Amino acid sequence: MTAGVLQLDNLSVRLRLPGGRFVSAVTGLSCTVRAGEVLALVGESGCGKSVLASTILGLLPGNAQVRGQVWLDDAAARTELLRAPEHELATRVRGRRIGLIPQSAGTHLTPVRTARSQLAEALAHHGSEGGGAEIASRVDELAQQVGLDPDDLYGYPHELSGGMTQRVVTALALAGNPLVLVADEPTAGLDRALVDHTVDLFRFVAGTGRAVLFITHDLAAAGRVADHLAVMYAGRLLELGPAREVLADPWHDYTRGLLAALPSGGLQPLPGHPPSLTELASGCAFHRRVPGECSGDPTLTWHGGRAVACR
Ligand SMILES: Nc1ncnc2c1ncn2[C@@H]1O[C@H](COP(=O)(O)OP(=O)(O)OP(=O)(O)O)[C@@H](O)[C@H]1O
Ligand code: NI
């Protein structure tokens, strides 16, 4: 197995609310994203996925308190991101070593300029050397990397299909040639065909040797593309392992519940609601919602290549 390029180690993030209470958005979370692989992070709305993405990119709001470590290990350097100065994150990490596809990325495209000129600008911003011809050939190369016909880039955003738009925003995230791509809910609101199209694109990107962290609440989309699956509930990982194995034989009751809620699992909704992260008691939040066999300790324990909580 290749070494991890992005390694989260015992990461906890709390957000202070006015009045002094805290939201425990991420608790004791560890996982590794490897080059050439897609790690899908799945969990219900509000479980802390976007806070996790913001933590990795150093984009947390001022009311956040972070513990643990986030290691980025690529050809450029080995860096602990939580202790890196903001200047370094801004100039050398975001966009250059880690590309982000933010939630609803398509809406961030400028409507009045062609996709080609927006990509060229991103390349110039990331310091691509040379003049117009050099940048034009880099744009074509990027287009090819995400499976776009370079001629499509002469279109304005409203002339692009949904699938083409996804390719353009992915190309934008790759303009600084990062080894890691973080995609936050890139398939939200898309129809099934476009979801498939988008996740296939991530497989393609991973095939170019990059590490992809695919954040989603869509377990079916995750299952289609992920090499590894991390299942998050109330800020913690409850299960982690090779996607195929986890989906074929889920170990945690929560993973089983998510699968049962899919059309293929019989559309049985999970009972109850996710807890508020403001006053999380210690112990296992899921088994307080849906009682089951639980040791009461939601710490992940490893069994071979897989890990599960509550055992
Ligand atoms: N700036 C903030 N200040 C306080 N609490 C916040 C802040 N940002 C997020 N939260 C809280 O942190 C928790 C996790 O939110 P987050 O956006 O990470 O969830 P998510 O899993 O990404 O959900 P979704 O799938 O809906 O995008 C939520 O309870 C949310 O209300
Ligand atoms: Ni439990």
Image (tube, rainbow, N blue to C red):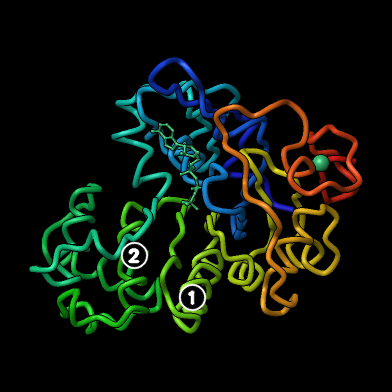
Farthest left residue in view: 112
Camera-side residue: 131 or 13?
13
Vertical comparison of 260 with 217: above or below: below
Question: In the rendered image, which quarter is residue 237 located in?
Answer: top right
Q: Secondary structure at mark 2?
A: helix
Q: CA distance from mark 2 to mark 1?
A: 17 Å
Question: Tag 1: Cα neighbours inside 10 Å, few (<14), some, or many (≥20)?
Answer: many
Residue 259 location, x and y as percent?
73, 67
Instruction: Say what amino acid the circle numbered 2 marks.
Output: Ala
Residue 155 or residue 239, whichever sits in front: 239
Q: Residue at x 47, y 45 (%)?
A: 50
Does the numbered disc 2 mark a residue whose Cβ is under 8 Å from ligand 1?
no
Q: Residue at x 21, y 77 (%)?
A: 153
Task: Give the SS element for disc 1.
Answer: helix
Name the residue at 37% across, 64% down: 170
Q: Is 150 drawn above or below residue 123 in the view shown?
A: below
Residue at image mark 1: 195
Q: Is residue 208 left or right of residue 254?
A: left
Q: Measuring 63% from the left and 65% from the top, which residue is drawn there?
A: 219
- Mark 2 vs mark 1: give the one in front: 1
> Which sits in the foreground, 252 or 2?
252
Which residue occupies the extreme top position in the image? 20
Tell me the tag on residue 171.
2
CB of residue at label 1: within 8 Å of ligand 1?
A: no
Of the four image quadrants, the one with ligand 2 is: top right
Residue 126 vs residue 48: left or right?
A: left
Instruction: Tell me the kind of residue under disc 1.
Output: Val
- Residue 140 in the image, given as x and y percentages of width and height: 27, 73
Q: Quadrant of residue 224?
A: bottom right
Q: Is residue 81 above or below residue 108?
A: above
Q: Work out whether 21 lies above or below 76.
A: above
